[in-house]
Structures are given as C-alpha cells and as structure tokens.
Amino acid sequence: MPTPRKKRRTKIATQKASPAGIARLIENEQQSLIDAQGIKKVGYLCAYTPLELLGAAGVKRARLLKGGNPDTVAHGELHTQSAFCDFTKSCIGGFEEGDPLYRSFDKIYNFHSCSSMKRASEAIAQFVPTKMLNLPRLRDEQSSRNFFREEILNLKRDLENLTGTSITDEEVRRQIVLHNQARLLLKKFSELRKRKNPPLSGKEYLELVRGYYYLPPETLLPSYEELYRRYEKPGRAAKRDDKPRLRLMVSGSIVADGDRRLLDIVEDELGADVVIEDHCAGFRPFHHLVPETGDPYQALADGYLDQAPCARMKPLSESVEFSARLAQEYNVDGVLYVYLKFCACHGISKIDFTTRFQEIGLPTLEISSDYSQSDHGQLKTRLEAFVEMLNDQKNIDHEQYANA
Amino acid sequence: MSNTLTLDPNLRSQTHNGGDAAARSPALEAFKALAAGYTLDSIRQQVAAGRQAVWTAVAWESPLILACDVIPISYGELWSEESKRTEALAESRFQMPVEFCSMVKCILGRLHLDRASELRRLLYYGGSCEPVSVVFEMAKKEGYDVHCIDSVTAYKDEDISPATISFLVEELRKVAVWLTGKPVDEDRLAAEIRFKNAVSRKIATILDLRLRAPFYLASVPTVQIVMGATHFFGQPEKYTRILDQLIDELKVAAKVPTNRSFIPLVLNGMGSPQLCKAIEEANGVILGWGFVDAVDYSEDIPPLESLALSLLKTQLQGGMGDVAGSPYALRRIGIEEKVRETNAKGIISTAITGCPYGSIVQQSERVHFKKRGIPVMTLEHTVHDEPLTEEQVMKVQTFVEMLS
C-alpha cells in the first residue's frame, strides 16, 4: 500500500509535466494500444524505423524495447538457446510468454540492423505477422541511400495494405516536422546536461526518450515543451547539492526499458551523473534531424542514415569518432562502456571504442552486461571503485588548480 | 565452414578417401594431386608475381572474382593454421569477449599476425554473420583494404524486386572496380557463370551417383570436391576433367550391388574431417549435404543481374546459411528435401559453439524435425583442427546405433 506521502507526490506529478508524468503517459498509451479496437497496431524494433510513416499511416505504434527481466529472457531462450544477447531474447520472450502489449500487435516491422535482431524478427514471425526490411550498412554511399528510400517506400506500401488507406506525401511531410520538433526538444533536453549541475538525471532523460518511442508527437510535445521551459531555467539542478557530481557517459549496446540497474547504482547509490548516452535508447538517435524539404522519402532515407551511427553501420570508425566527440562535447570525467553479452556490434569492437576514449584521456570502465540479477554486488563494487578513482582524480586536479 | 576447406597440404593428408575407391580411383588420385598444388604458398607466389588475390567467402560471388582475374581465397584459410594461437591473440590483444565463436577470434588473430602479408584485400557481404563483419571492419586499422557489399536480404518472393536487383548489381559493379580499377568484362563473367553452372551440374551428378555407390567416395573428399567448385583449385579445366573422370568411375561403381549395411544421413552445417570419419566409423554414411546449394545462375539475363538474382534466390531457399544472410527458418525446407531424396534416417546438425545463427537454427530445426518424425542430433564444435571429444564420438555412435 502506498503511503499518504507517496500518494500526495503522485497527485502533484500528474498536474505538472515530469519524466514520471511521461512514464504514466506511456503506461496509458500502452494500455490504450492493448484495448483499442478498429485501429491497426504496429510494433517496431529499431531506432532506424521511420516513425513518420507509422504516424502518417494512422496506426498505433510502440517500440519493442522491453527488457531487463530474466524470466522473459528464459522464454526467449526457448528459441535462441544461449548465443544471443538478452535484449533479443527478451523481444522473442515477450511474445512467447504472452506479454499483452506484444501480443496485441497486428504487425511487426523491422528494418533489421544487426544479424541478431534480424534472427529475432524471424522468430517473432511465429507469433505475429512480421515484415522485414533492409537497412543498408554503408551510410555514406548514395546508392545505399537510394536503396533505403526504396525500402521506405516498401514500408509505405505495406502500411497502406495493412490499414487500407493511402499515405499522402503531405501527411508524411507533416509528420517529419512533428517528429523533428520532438527530436529537437530531446536534443535540447540533452544539451541542458552540459551544465555543471544538470537539471535532469540520466534516468530522467531515458524516460523522455522512452516517450518518443511509444507516444505520438501530438501527445508528447505539450509535455516536452512544458518540461523544457521548466528545466531550462538557470539554477535548476536535478540534485539539490552544490557539490559538483562526477559526469559520466554511457556508451555501447541498447539499454532496454526495464534495464536500469546500472543507472540506479551510478546515480542513486554512488552519486554520479550520467550526462550523455551513446546508445540507441538514449541520446544517439536525436543528434540529427530529418530534412523538411524535397522528396519526403529521400529525406527520411537521408535523415535516418545521417543519424549518429550504431556500431553495426559502416565504417565503424564513424561510430567510434562520434562517441569520442560526444564525450568531449559533454565534458565527461569518464566513460562506462556497457555492452550486452553476445552483442557482436559493441562486444567485438569494444577495443576500438575503449582505445579511442583512452587516447582522449578518458578513463573507461568496460562492463559486459546481461539481465540476470545475480551480479549486482560485483557490478556495484566495480562501479564504486571506478567512481572513487575518478573522484580522487578530480579532487587532485581541483587541488592542483587551486594551488597553482 | 571448417578445415576441410583448407589449402594446407599437411592438413589435407588427413583427407584420404577412406571409401572403397581409396586404392583404386585414378580420379581421386588426380584430385589429391590437384588439391596438393593449391596452397596459400602457391597463391602468395602468384601474388608476388603480379596476380591479385582477395579474401572472400568464396560462395555465390566467386564467378565475379574469377572474371576479374583475381584469385579468391576462402576465409577458411584464416583459421587453418595456429588456430589456438590466433584465438588467444584475439582474446588477449583485442580483448574479444570469450563468448564469441572460435572462428571470429581466429580470423581477427590471423589478420593481425598477417598484417604485413601480401594478402591484404578483404571482401565481405554485409548481410552475412555480424561478428565476421565487425572483425573485417576492425581489420581496416591493421592496414587491410576492406570492401563491403551492402546488405540485401530477400525473405519472401516479393522481396526480389527490380529495386533490390538493381541495387545488388550496382554493389557488384563496385566490387569489380575495387578489385581491378575498371568495370568487369561482362562477357567473361557470363562465361564464368556458364562454367560454374556446368561444374554444379557435374557435382550434382556425382552426389546423385554416390547415392547408389555410397562407399566408393568417402565423405571428406566429397566435401573437398564440392567446395572446390568455387575456385577449381586454380585449374578449372583440370578440375572438370577430374569430375568427369570421377563420374565415369561412379557410374561403374553404382552398377555393383553392395550388401554392406549403413545408415544414410544428412549433414547439416559443416563437418570437420574428424566428424566425417567418426560418422563413417559408426556405420553412418552422409548422403545429403546441407551446404550444397541448388541455385543455378540464370544464363539468359545480364551476368551481374544473374549473380544478384542467385544470391536472392539462395536466400529464399535458406541456402548458404549466414554466409548469404539467409533467413534461418527457410533452411529446413532444403534439408527436408535432402532427407527425402536420400532416404536419410536422420540429420546430424553441426554448429560452431557461440554462433548465434547456429544456435537459433539448430533449436528451430530440432523442434521442426521432431514434429515431422525425423531424428536430429546436434553437435557443437570449434574450428580447431583437433580430435573430436569422447563425448562427441559417443554422441555420434549412439545416434547412429539408435537409427539402426
């Protein structure tokens, strides 16, 4: 039973926009998606899916982003055995165990990124009709961009068949503008974290990003705008503590909806701030906007391929450099390079990332992660040691500066 | 893939026939001599003398490489020598997480050791295995000249569209320019395609005759003969003459009735020489081979289009596994057909430990074939050239005994 104090807090939160308010909007939207009749419901898997088309098609949509529960992982393993990351297992496991949201979808779309997600979509096709679409790797090649445009048109045709209504170019353009507004606000929210005392925590930022993947921009934008007006005011800090906190970046694999244990330890228990993320459930997809002029389908192709690349995209060096630039731009004290076990993109290439961080003088802690709950103590010890080491270093630097 | 592909004559000494033809097949004697002359050293000498060579999957794309007058070298060579050392190197120097398969670790380690070698050009298909793609991208930092054919996968018939074909054709054009600095001679490519088709038909005849003379040609040379169809051991005319000779021998052998009992099997995945021998020692005979793809190249369309179409059709048959990025759920169709064609009593399915594709495909086929009443035994292995474990041998023996 919640305490009266907690009840009072909840009531206040419903009155003003807040990350917790966004979370409630998401819950409501998910329930509404489950309950909805007479409207098509679409799930999608990757941040490279042009949501503008889903919006223009008038479907209800949600990203398959749940994860963090070892039971769901176990259900996924009925299909994959062990050699897949826990996120892909969770995507399959959600269907296997009958997650009401996942089971309510009429269709799943996947612009397949890594080969594990491609295989996961094939497994999901046993439960829900699934449409696989090609996502080129060579983001700098014009022919790959043109082909991606064709695949986006392929998605458009499929959505039209699904809904029985045409998608107009005008509506696609309108959706691009709307989604750009949301993307721009997420970028601006993130930039507020460049402040010495950020007005929002890493966990709060991830809540805002979750909103983008589950809520239509029409619902989301009023909350984002109100929240941004509040957060941008000078002097607002997420933590009422004058002492500057350690600034960290999280780089690496996807961070699923229910996978907050690392952030819980870092931000709540160890008193550091995650001020920027280079992963596809954090800031990374919001670094770029989609062009608002010209052919809307080419604009989508270019805009989505121009977004900051995940390690699946080629050349790999661009992903590495982006991560390094982001760390510098946000003036972080250290990097947590976190990859899910069996994530080929971020696990195998980790040496390229961690070496680059070290080259620019950033201490880096590498964490191989999964959704088991058994290694909390070990994880905390490693994070604690890293944070202590960085704090010591920061104090030394500060003293040296003061004595100079 | 396994070391049955190796060009190393020392390893090849293990691949004696072992069948009835061991002592009396002039064709196999000629084949052994042909294969013995096709080594990495011989390729290096040709490169030193001015020819070009490229590391490649040596699969559907091989006619293009040959038409460019470039020697294709199979990735299989990257784990044929000192594999334990190269695997350890990947884990130590490159900190590759232990959970990844021995194949990718050996590739990374070998590429590092050979970074000063003359064989420094790498071609890969972006739709194939993710870990391999990542490792090849990382090889750029080691000074390798790496080219990626961008990712296109057909999941359903309607995915073979003019857009996908023309994109792939463009990708293949780029390969030729990358290899030689100029467009491919399309007449030469058409000739290579016709030649490859002719070879494929001869191999199909050999495999068909082998059904009636199962002891004439043992498994290991069968695999080598089949795999040679992509590079012809550098001597295409001689290779085809040997195939013709072998066909003639098998025609005679097929007329001789055998009263030896055996258990006909289909091998799905690649088998090491040691596994092939263990199956034969247990009184099993592999009559169907999962890796033998049945797609011919069309000869009545432009040759680059023919290559593109062959990849897409191969994918729709689940052929070539992750080498072609084929949907895993389609592989079972071809396997089931092979079971019917060969009257096999069971399937032995192999995969490299830690391979995501192998992991999901084995699980899916285990469930599928169980429903169809076809016994399946799954085995995991590494790419190291080492004896089977006692457990693996026992598993093979028990499986074959169970089917007796």
Image (cartoon, coloured by chain):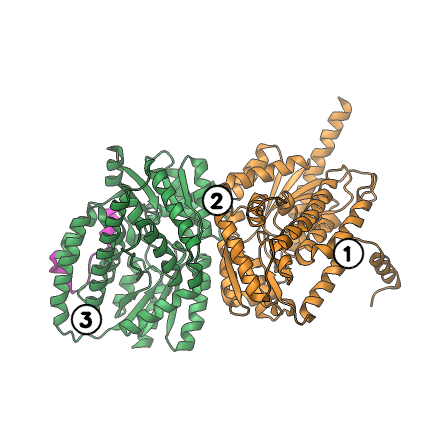
Chain colours: A orange, B green
Count neighbours of disc 1 (C-alpha within 10 A) and say few if under 14, some if 14 to 19, many if 20 or more. some
What secondary structure is found at the residue carrying circle 1? Answer: helix
Does the CB distance between marks 1 and 2 fall below 8 Å?
no
Q: Magenta span has B10? A: yes
Judge from the rendering whether residue B317 lies leftward or rightward of residue A245; answer left or right: left
Q: Amino acid at mark 2?
A: Leu
Q: Amino acid at mark 1?
A: Ala
Up-down relation of residue B134 to residue B331 (above or below): above
Distance, label 2 to label 3, CA atoms, is 49 Å
Dot 3 falls on a residue whose secondary structure is helix
Query: Are discs 3 and 1 located on one and the same chain?
Result: no
Magenta stretch: give its range.
B8-26
- Of all chains, the one bearing label 1 is A
Q: Residue B119 placed where, x, y %?
A: 33, 38
Residue count near mark 3 (Cα–Cα under 10 Å), binned few <14, some 14–19, many ≥20:
some
Upstream in the sequence, badge 1 or badge 2?
Answer: 1
| Circle 3 or circle 1, nearest the eye | 1
